[in-house]
Amino acid sequence: MTHSREKAVLVLEDGNRYEGIAYGAIGTTFGEIVFATGMTGYQETLTDPSYAGQIVMMTAPHIGNTGANDLDMESRQIWVNGFIVRDPSRIVSNFRSERSLNDDLEGGGIIGISNIDTRAVTRHIRSQGAMRAGVFSGPAAAISAEEQLAAVKSAEQMSGRNLSGDVSTPEAYVVPAVGQSHGTVAILDLGVKTSTVNYIAARGFDAHVLPQTVTSADVLALKPAALFFSNGPGDPSASDGHVRLLQEVLRAGIPFFGICFGNQLLGRALGFTTYKLPFGHRGINQPVLDKATGRVEITSQNHGFAVDAPIEGVIESPAGFGRVEVSHFSLNDNVVEGLRCLDLNAFSVQYHPEAAAGPHDSNYLFDRFRDMVLAANQTGAAN
């Protein structure tokens, strides 16, 4: 395993600069800089499609210790635009390791930077908010600071971007149910993770994963027992087509479950708006309150947008879908973390109950989804 000793520089759009050493591939990359607070799960983070368009900075100081392997891949490739760490591991030590993290970064063309004060950068982002950034390494690190900053400022903003087409599967595929099949769950792939599909199949459903270009007619033609919207990158306000699809399927009486981006799109389908958070929630240690049980769950999260809805009381859906309540909210900042429809078989959560790297406090939600679908189908059969 080798590490480059070439110079690299991280440039933020407000002019702040941090000089370090190149990590991964050499070159130039741009994206929205965000920080992730998990001490483990770096491979799952890198291969989570929700991070497309972003330069991810790990707040844990030592990254790469356990190497990388094929089993922990959450999708077919690494999706981050760039990667920032303080101290990359010089030695890989784990019985499951098949290669080093640096090997994966170089092989995937992921440009990164190491040996910078990630705590200082994190504090700056917490104060000023997520912003555009660029990593310049190798020869690109030598161009003038003025040119580097101008390039960062000309990069795309995250607000208003629809990135679903970049990460969705090009072709539909099916993962068969484990054991007896209870029917088909249509999964709209907006950036779905492998663990999500496997958890749904493990609950006895044929997981039919669909490209994000499908129509409501395509979904209904499958005669699904339920519809699922996955996590994914981008701004939910730029996904009008997915919102219309969900509204049409809800009107057809199909049960629904959404995670992360799927939660935001359910919120929009119900008539609520979404907004951009200052620096988002990213990491595997986010406390969330389940209002129904009073239980606090430690959750994995990765989102920069949220649903704008009151966290107390029952609300009439502005789009005419009956009564809705916020089912979960963040104990850090009261952000909406879940929605539950009282007159429809539909619910969603903002966090990740499928997080393969943990925590697994919220994995029961897949059981709740299965129970809702089975009850709805029994009621439909009786009628």
Image: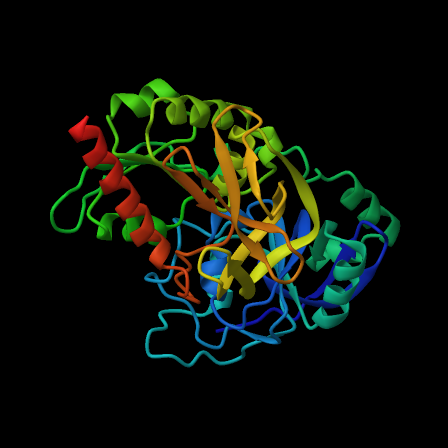
**Residue that protrudes farthest toward the top in the picture:** 217
In the rendered structure, the answer to whether residue 60 lies left or right of residue 347 reads right
Q: Splitting the image into 4 quarters, where does residue 207 fall?
A: top left
Name the residue: 75% across, 65% down: 121
User: Residue 200: x, y in percent?
Assistant: 28, 48
**Residue that protrudes farthest toward the right in the picture:** 146
| Image color mode | rainbow
In the rendered structure, the answer to whether residue 208 lies left or right of residue 67 reads left
User: Residue 61: x, y in percent?
Assistant: 62, 76
Classify 314 as above or below 120.
Answer: above
Classify 296 as above or below 373.
Answer: below
Judging depth in this view, the residue of 90 and 373 nearest the camera is 373
User: Residue 148: x, y in percent?
Assistant: 80, 49
Quadrant the C terminus occupies? top left
Q: How many marks?
A: 0
Name the residue: 30% across, 35% down: 226
User: Residue 296: x, y in percent?
Assistant: 50, 66
Let me know if residue 117 appears in the view. Answer: no
Judging depth in this view, the residue of 7 and 14 nearest the camera is 14
In the rendered structure, the answer to whether residue 177 lies left or right of residue 140 reads left
**Residue that protrudes farthest toward the left in the picture:** 180
Let me know if residue 333 appears in the view. Answer: yes
